[in-house]
Amino acid sequence: MPQFVSTISAIFWGVLVLSILVTAHEAGHYFAARLCKARVTEFFIGMPSRHKWSWRSKKHGTEFGITPILLGGYTRICGMSPLNQLEYARGLELVQTQGSIEVEQAAQQLDCSVEDAYDIFETLVDWAAIEPDYESHEGDKPKGRSLPNSYKTTLRDSAFNTKFDDSFDENTELMQAGTAQPLTMTAQDFLDQERSKIYVGKKFWARFFMIFAGPVASFITGVLFMVLSLSVVGQEVPTNDPMIGAVVEHSLAQQAGLQSGDRLLAVDDHKVDSFTDLAGLLKDKFDKHEAFELSYQRDGSAQSLQITPAQNDTALGIYAPTKWAHLSVGEALNITWKFSVQIAQFAAKLIVPTQTMNVVSQSSSIVGISVMASQAASSGLGTLLLFAAQISLSLAFMNLLPIPPLDGGKILIEFIQVIIRKPLSERTQSYISFVGIALFACLFLLSLKNDILRFI
């Protein structure tokens, strides 16, 4: 039963912490996309699933919700998939002028294969320019991820804005989904208008901002949690008083009869004025394995005892006394900065071949994070916030590694496209992504192995 309770606790706190941090990360992508006036169709906590609980924003059309697979989250920004050289303009024109069209019929009119026709229409669905039409053919709606037989127009206002556009005006004469919507411009001009409202149609710095905003949001969340933990909630910090705060079980100190609250006076003839002094004197004795006399005061009475370290004894086994302290915001930010530098250096070592395995051996998977989240929660709110801050900062810097499908990998692809002055093909980007996914699958399995050996 205790093991069952521990497992449930680990799952609960792991899911809670990761859900909050992933939501913050994805919120960065979402708000950046909104600022850049790019269409965003979905914002979900959890991985994609047929089963979900959601609601749709009347202002922006975005569907917000949660899925049962609470192992992450996602923001669906329109137009992030690479494009092929296909007749997107003509395909969009066919749907607009007819209201709804079957894929096979469209393939004949476009003089292309059915596969290419599906590619065209699915890309336009990703842009939120059209919708899959499951209602025109009875029994057509799939239970899984099957493609529809036809596609239809989406709801637009008189200026051809969709519900996902900031400029959408529901007070104008609306063109309903599935109805013919004859164009007032050329097919290419209409496609260019649609393209200007999605990720791939934005300028380089806007695309960079939308990707980079996720790690920035994680970093800000980590800083906020760190300040809350250290400055608002407070932390138990060691003092420098020459007293025993706690005695380690089965240690040399416990065997000698030392107790919490004993004030240490001297080591041999060396007076002790602080715990730092004591630590230095004891280290010297234990390094040399020399016997020494320890003088201390208990309940106002001065006492002494002889300590003789054995060859396998490396420490006396005592902790410094602690006090509850609230650091200033400046002190908390200084600690956060130092910790962030350490995490950034740790993350950078992951892509250095000679350091990769060493970094992986010190890393944890979602299993380890869940166990540590449960342990942190049992120690109090301050410790839990501190742990969440550390994970959030790690999420920020790890995501900046130039490895697809991480944000850093997407940024790398954007820079490559700027340098070569043309977009990478869908095939090239797919190959790069497959390599990145394979790499992270290996890293996950190695981290999972570490957690199993460490916690189970």
Image (spheres, rainbow, N blue to C red):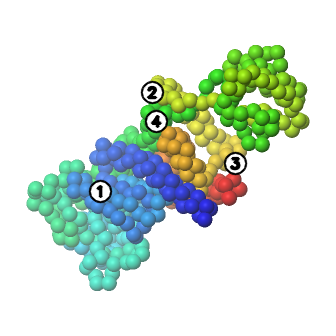
Q: Residue at x 28, y 84 (%)?
A: 138
For badge 1, the amino acid type reads Thr
Closer mark to the observer between disc 1 and disc 3 = 3
Q: Are marks 3 and 4 in contact (CB under 8 Å)?
A: no
For badge 3, the amino acid type reads Ser
CA gap, disc 1 to disc 4?
36 Å
Q: Earlier along the polypeptide chain: callout 1 or callout 4?
A: 1
Give the vertical position of 438 relative to 207 (above or below): below
For badge 4, the amino acid type reads Val
For badge 2, the amino acid type reads Val
Front-lying residue, 135 or 254:
254
Query: Relative to residue 240, is residue 21 drawn left or right?
Result: left
Q: Earlier along the polypeptide chain: callout 3 or callout 4?
A: 4
Identify the residue under disc 1: 62
Identify the residue under disc 4: 233
Front-lying residue, 392 or 130:
392
Residue 353 visible in rendering: no
Task: Give how far across and how far down residue 307 sits, in percent.
Answer: 85, 29
Q: Residue at x 48, y 50 (%)?
A: 17
Disc 2 is placed on an element classified as helix
CA gap, disc 1 to disc 2?
37 Å
Identify the residue under disc 2: 329
Identify the residue under disc 3: 361
Closer mark to the observer between disc 3 and disc 4 = 4
